Image: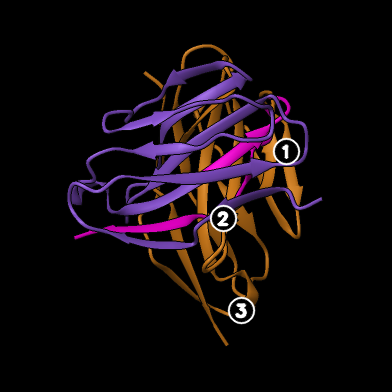
Chain colours: A orange, B purple
Amino acid sequence: GNSVTQMEGPVTLSEEAFLTINCTYTATGYPSLFWYVQYPGEGLQLLLKATKADDKGSNKGFEATYRKETTSFHLEKGSVQVSDSAVYFCALGTNGNKLVFGAGTILRVKS
Amino acid sequence: NAGVTQTPKFRILKIGQSMTLQCTQDMNHNYMYWYRQDPGMGLKLIYYSVGAGITDKGEVPNGYNVSRSTTEDFPLRLELAAPSQTSVYFCASSLSYNEQFFGPGTRLTVL
């Protein structure tokens, strides 16, 4: 079946550090891939997406590349800020308009 | 646009009580979803709907019921609440399978 595996958190970084959150997936067919972000006390918001192999999604300084050969969609940011502290979810979208989410990775950025 | 709204924000139920979680969207989206979020477990799909009058089970439907009489509303009913239903519940909607928009969530505790 379809599944998403994310690196366990929490990830704690100092401001301006480089961020990588690993995400790998298992899927039949050709899924779309997403990163969602959840700020404290809020619902999830779409951060970025990629709909086919080798696509790069980017938003707010974050980026992720859809790698079919390694079934990965790792999230990166060159310089994190305190305001980036949140929970990040990797997800894949399949036929039928349903999403499968990873367990989420907590990011804490210290000033 | 208000987007996706959910009520109530918080609720405490006693074992065996019932309640309805309300969800409304004003974006004219056909697809609507209910998820539950348990700590460290990501989001699990409870029920979804592809349009008014059409609903289907997700990954964890037991103990819940839904209805979709209008495009805008997608209430989730809990009958005979159990401690295992303590969770945060999110409603979401989408126009296509590329992006889901989430409400702010309902935090439910069953004691």
> Real-space Cα distance between discs 3 and 2?
19 Å
Q: Which residues are magenta?
A: B91-111
Amino acid type, residue under disc 3 in the picture:
Val
**In this rendering, which labeled residue sits more in front, label 3 or label 1?**
3
Q: Quadrant of the rendered structure where residue B24 is?
A: top right
Q: Is residue A46 visible to us here?
A: no
Instruction: Answer few, some or many: residues within 10 Å of disc 1's Cα (few below 14, many 20 plus, some between 14 and 19).
Output: some
In-image side of A48 versus A9 (left or right): right
> Real-space Cα distance between discs 3 and 1?
25 Å
Query: Which percent across, then down, holds residue A102?
Result: 42, 42
Amino acid type, residue under disc 2 in the picture:
Gly
Compared to B72, does A83 lie above or below? Answer: below
Determine the chain carrying the residue at label 3: A
Query: Which percent across, then down, holds residue B97?
Result: 66, 25
Q: Which residue is mark 1?
A: A56
Residue nearer the viewer, A65 or B89? B89
Amino acid type, residue under disc 1 in the picture:
Lys
Q: Is residue B108 a member of the stretch shown in magenta? A: yes
Query: Which percent across, then down, holds residue B62?
Result: 27, 29
Instruction: Answer few, some or many: residues within 10 Å of disc 3's Cα (few below 14, many 20 plus, some between 14 and 19).
Output: some
Tally of numbered discs: 3
Determine the chain carrying the residue at label 1: A
Q: Do the residues under discs 3 and 1 have CB atoms within 8 angstroms?
A: no
Residue A43: mark: 2
Give the structural element (helix, strand or loop) at label 1: strand
Give the structural element (helix, strand or loop) at label 2: loop
Q: Is residue B58 a member of the stretch shown in magenta? A: no
The residue furthest right is B1
Q: Quadrant of the rendered structure where residue B88 is?
A: bottom left
Q: Which residue is mark 3?
A: A82
Quarter containing the C terminus of chain B:
bottom left
